[in-house]
Structure formats: structure tokens, C-alpha cells
Image: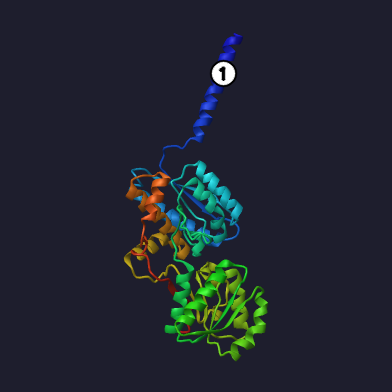
Amino acid sequence: MKRNMQILGFCMLFVILLLSGCSLMPANTGVLIGTNLALSGKGMSYSTSTERGIELAKDMVNDRGGLLGKPVQLVSVDNHGKPEDAVAAIQQLTVRHVSAIIGPDLADCTRAVIPNVEAVKIPLISPACTQPDITVDAQSHEVYRYIFRAAYIDASQGRAMADYALKQLHVKRAAVFYYPDKMYAQGLAEYFRSAFAASGGDVPVYIPVENVLDLTKYLPLLQREQVDVIYLPGYDDWTIPAIELLRSHGVSLPLLGPDGWNGPKMERDVDKDYLTQVYYTDHYAGHDATDAAKRFSQAYYEKYGEWPDSYAALGYDAFMMTADAIERCQSAEAADVARELVKTIDYDARRGPFPSMPITMPLKTSSS
């Protein structure tokens, strides 16, 4: 009897171990695509839209049969907007054997995961990172093998805004104020200044400003230098106070900015009168007339009850780029998907060919 109980106990232990072992193995239930986004904490307002765009794209792909005859499943990990958590998310997604990873959106989180992604050899697409060093090593200038992007780079939007200011706003003398501790703002400031000067403009005021309140001491300089436009590269947490300070002190000049202005806080939190003559570069415009963009916008509205922003569009694009690569190579193996993504040129799921230049949009024009 005792021997039988020992055998029974051993068999039960074996079954438990077998079942627990099976739970660690990837289930053959579909194609797994990971997301590494800030669903809480810093960057949540951006990444929530990105996730919605990804979810919409996943649903649309599954509605037409999935990929490789299998449904697509998302494996989502919240990185809380923290680089260390973004690195931990890569480890979690690697264990899940995902075919590709979408995100992070934030540049510091994306930079942090590059060594890990290159080591595990899983392709990662950052939907919204615009800094050039995301896909190219800043020291060696070598292109990373497994890091991709769905957005244009900062040099493009710096040139686009300079061109818009000169040709559409007909201004000649610009002031540039930027937050010095952000590589994003530093890079954009220099790209804009170079492009503006190269096309015949002048930038007599070019000043790093860490504390927004310090802008007040430069207000007389704007008048003395006869500045007729101001460029404020940075994210909305710095530029919203800057816009409010300038407008409250009577500065009515056109204010220009980058894609970092395109979160919901700008239009929600800033006095509408302050947004007259405020323009920014973006990846997507709701007024885009292409059939693909209309279908995307309408589908997004039907699913979420609101119109998409550029982060939603970029999340959608990043997923569709991944799906397109999987379909072309007829494989869900990460290495195969990475090789196919390298071949992806001029792909934009919403619009057809990827636009060569960013879109310049007014938050509110003087006529609206």
C-alpha cells in the first residue's frame, strides 16, 4: 500500500511538472507580436493612442484571415515610460517568442533597449521615435540590424518647418528657444536653424532655456532683433508653459513646433486664443484626402468613438509594416521578419507611399 501511494505521488508530481512545463512553451495559437509601450506614467497620453492604432490594425488583419493562416495575438507589456522597465519588457517578450516588437514610443526608452534587441535578434519598430540615433549608432554610424522606425526623422521635420515658415508664412528672421537637456529639442533646434539659414532666412536669436520663466528676460531681444517668428522645439510639457508665457506677455508672432506638440494636452489645456498662429509638423493629418487615410480614420472612429491622432496612425502603420513583412517572407520567425523589414521602402499603410516630408499643421489659424 505504501509503495502504491509512493508511485501515485510520483505520477501526480510528474503530471504537475509536465503541465507546468507546457505552460512555459509557446502555444501554437497564432502569430505573436509584442508591444512595449508606456500604458501608464510618462508618455501614457502618446502610447495609449499608439496602442489603439495597433489594436485596430490587428483586428483588421484578423478580419481578413490573420497571418499565415493563423490569428494574430498581441502580447502587451507596460514599460511605464521608464527605460529600465522598457528593458525588462524586452526580456518578457523574448520569453514569449514574439515575431516582432512594436515600441517604445519614447526615445530614451528606445535607446535603452537597443543592446538587448540586437542581442536577442527580434525586430523592433518604434512607431514615433524621430531621432536619427535610434536606427544608426551615433559613434560608429553603423545601421542597427534589428531596430526600425515608422516615423520620419528630425532632420526632415526641421527642414519642413523652415521651408513652411519661409514660403508660406513669408517670415525672414527667426528666434529659436529650446530645452537644453533634451537631445530631441537640441537636434530639432539645430536642424531648423541650418535649414532656415540655408534657404535665406536669419536666426539672430538662438538660446537654450531650461526654466520657461527665463523667457521673459529675452522678450526685449525679440523686438530689438526684429524677429518675426519663433521656433520652440520640445515636448508639450515644456512648450505649453512657453506658449502661455509668450502669449500672456503680448507676443503675437507665429509660434512653430515639432511633432512633440501633437498630444491631446495642447488643444485641451491651452487657451484657444493663444493657439492662433501656432503651427507644428506632424506625421498624419485628419484632413488627408487619400482613400486609405479615410478608411483608417473612419474605422478608428467606429471602434473608439473619436478621430485618430498621429500616434494612433503611427501605431497602425508599425503593425501593418510588420504584417506586410510576415506575409512577404511567409514566416513568423523573428530573423526572417527582420530581413524582410530591411527591404521595406516607402511603405505607409494609411497613405500609400510614405510621404517624403512631414505635414505642417496649424493648431488654430488666424482665420479659424
For mark 1, give the secondary structure. helix
Q: Is residue 294 above or below residue 209?
A: above
Q: Is residue 319 above or below residue 261?
A: above
Viewer-proximal residue, 192 or 250?
A: 192
Q: Amino acid at mark 1?
A: Phe
Residue at position x 42%, y 68% in the image: 284
Q: Is residue 110 above or below residue 262?
A: above
Q: Position of residue 305 (x, y in %)?
A: 45, 61
Q: Is residue 65 left or right of residue 189?
A: left
Viewer-proximal residue, 196 or 100?
A: 196
Q: Position of residue 217 (x, y in %)?
A: 67, 83
Residue carrying label 1: 10
Residue 206 lies in what quarter of the image?
A: bottom right
Number of callouts:
1
Viewer-proximal residue, 110 or 7?
A: 110
Q: Position of residue 304 (x, y in %)?
A: 45, 59
Image colouring: rainbow
Q: Is residue 232 above or below residue 145?
A: below
Residue at position x 47%, y 70% in the image: 155
Residue 265 lies in what quarter of the image?
A: bottom right
Residue at position x 62%, y 68% in the image: 181
The residue at the far top in this view is 1
